[in-house]
Image (cartoon, rainbow, N blue to C red):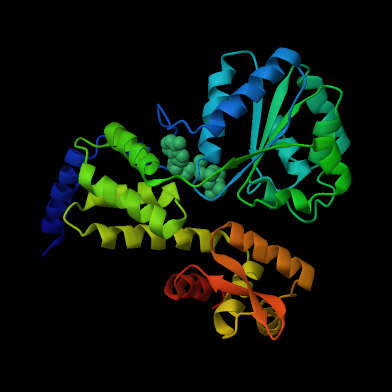
Amino acid sequence: MDIDDYLSKREQEFNRINRRIKNFNVFDFNYIPKKPLLRPEVKVIVDAVLQYRQTNLPTHLLITGSRGSGKTLLIKYIANLFSNRELTFQYANCRLYNSSFKILAHFLDLRPRGYGLNELWQEFLNIHRKPTVLILDEIDLLSDKDRNKEILYLASRSEQNYMLILLSNNPKFLNSLDESIKSTLQPRMIFFRNYIVPEINKILHQRAKEGLRRIPNWQIRQIAALTVRDTNSDVRVAIKALYYHALEPARDITEIFRQAKHDIISDLLNDLNDRNLLILKAAINDTEKHVKSVYQRYKTISQHFGEEPFSYVYFYNNLSYLQSLGLLILISTKVSRSYTNRIQLLFNQESFQEVFDRRFD
Ligand SMILES: Nc1ncnc2c1ncn2[C@@H]1O[C@H](COP(=O)(O)OP(=O)(O)OP(=O)(O)O)[C@@H](O)[C@H]1O
Ligand SMILES: [Mg+2]
């Protein structure tokens, strides 16, 4: 086939796809749908924000829930609703802005160099003299170097009574904070439980209505069931599977679903830092998979790749983090009269190996 033929053939294929998909944006994970599915926990958030606007007395919120349970989407949706109602919202994702310093510079739209933290904070106070809600997404990714988590101190102690909304998929995030921050913050805890099949069904249905020319009811039901069964209800996988189905409607749904899940896991593994990848590598290589033996193996592997290993405490914290991402679970098991934690891995090794080889060639 020469290049002209190839081009014409591909062009026809693209035209066929365009006949099925009317809006590609709905498959972007940052897309904010016109009418997201309302989960009951959202009412509690709306009430807390309304009350803050009315009284200027904040109740800080800590929203937790597993990956793809709608934390980011719903909080952004609420922030948009309130922005026409005289309340200011500031949003930062701590994956991108991983220190108090970078977060404040981001809020002020400044480059962080050349300023002190206090200087930035004073500037923030000057600009935000009215009630303001600070949303810190993926708060557990605030760097360990930012020991005192100053932004939480400053915001929760400020005389201007800012309200903090923290989002995390780590249910134990609060335990990682100093007692003194915990006591000033005293957040109200809101937990987004995993979606059930009918909820994911509705979310996909709505997406399909906005993005596709025909709604594949039967396939949506199948994807929703697989998402709950095989992924902890991660709606990202469901949306990706729906997209792949729209691209290749003739392909088997279970096959498409497997690919969507694989791609999402690869993205997740790709986002991990080197040390977390080494921890997972050690867990894969260790046959017993007890936390202590995996730690020994992790130290050896780290030395092999010239990385400084974490101390045991940090190693353990990182296991909790990897658990909150849904990559593993820690199971308490009895070994000769005492209990120890065993690591059970929740991803397939091929997805891992691809990412690992690319990083540690
Ligand atoms: N209630 C909902 N209505 C419509 N779409 C939803 C809903 N909940 C989640 N989604 C969609 O699922 C995807 C994942 O949601 P989101 O990013 O909000 O998850 P998250 O809880 O923030 O996950 P993570 O912990 O990984 O950050 C997004 O594309 C989002 O639009
Ligand atoms: Mg999120």
Q: Quadrant of residue 129?
A: top right
Q: From this view, report whether residue 56 is shown above or below residue 193.
A: above
Hey, which residue is sitting farthest front in the picture? 337
Q: Pick whichever, 148 or 359, lies toward us.
A: 148
Query: Residue 178's x, y, as percent?
Result: 85, 49
Query: Residue 175's x, y, as percent?
Result: 77, 52
Q: Quick check: can you spot residue 323?
A: yes
Query: Residue 334's x, y, as percent?
Result: 66, 79
Q: Which residue is drawn at 82% across and 42% down?
A: 182
Horizontal side, residue 322 vs residue 235: left or right: right
Q: Which residue is drawn at 72% across and 63% down?
A: 317
Image quadrant holding the N terminus, namely: bottom left
Ligand 2 positioned in quadrant: top right
Q: Quadrant of residue 348?
A: bottom left
Q: Pick whichever, 272 or 311, lies toward us.
A: 311
Q: Which residue is drawn at 72% across and 39% down?
A: 103
Horizontal side, residue 146 vs residue 217: left or right: right
Image quadrant holding the C terminus, namely: bottom right
Q: In which quarter of the image is residue 105?
A: top right
Query: Residue 273's x, y, as percent?
Result: 63, 64
Q: From this view, report whether residue 358 is shown above or below residue 69.
A: below
Count of numbered marks:
0
Q: Quick check: can you spot residue 115?
A: no
Q: From this view, report whether residue 88 is shown above or below residue 100.
A: above
Q: Which residue is drawn at 44% across and 57% down?
A: 231
Horizontal side, residue 284 vs residue 306: left or right: left
Q: Pick whichever, 251 or 4, lies toward us.
A: 251
Horizontal side, residue 272 vs residue 154: left or right: left
